[in-house]
Image: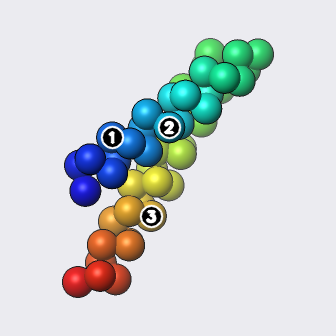
Amino acid sequence: MNLERRIIKLAIVELLESVANFPFVYKLRGLEEVIRIGSNYVTSKHKHLN
């Protein structure tokens, strides 16, 4: 699960860095939001498996 979360974070960072015209603050807010959504998704996915 830790590895999945790390992969999600890396993918998000890559995505945001490719959108270079975004203001930095919005990048950070978006990153936090997507990490929360992503980790919630991963967590709920694991709950369904167990």
Question: What amino acid is at disc 2?
Answer: Ala
Residue where numbered disc 3 is placed: 41
Q: Nearer the viewer, residue 32 or 38?
A: 38
Q: Which residue is found at the position 26% from the left and 47% from the top? A: 3
Measure the alpha-carbon separation of dots 1 and 3: 14 Å
Measure the alpha-carbon separation of dots 1 and 2: 9 Å
Question: What amino acid is at disc 1?
Answer: Arg
Asked whether the viewer can see residue 47, the reply is: yes
Q: Nearer the viewer, mark 1 or mark 3?
A: 1
Q: Nearer the viewer, residue 29 or 42?
A: 42
Quick one: label 2 or label 3, which is nearer the N terminus?
2
Q: Position of residue 16 (x, y in %)?
A: 61, 28
Q: Position of residue 27 (x, y in %)?
A: 61, 25
Quick one: label 1 or label 2, which is nearer the N terminus?
1
Question: What amino acid is at disc 3?
Answer: Tyr
In the picture, the quarter occupied by the N terminus is bottom left
Q: Which residue is found at the position 23% from the left and 83% from the top? A: 50
Numbered tag placed on residue 45 in the rendering: none
Residue 44, placed above or below residue 5: below
Residue where numbered disc 2 is placed: 11
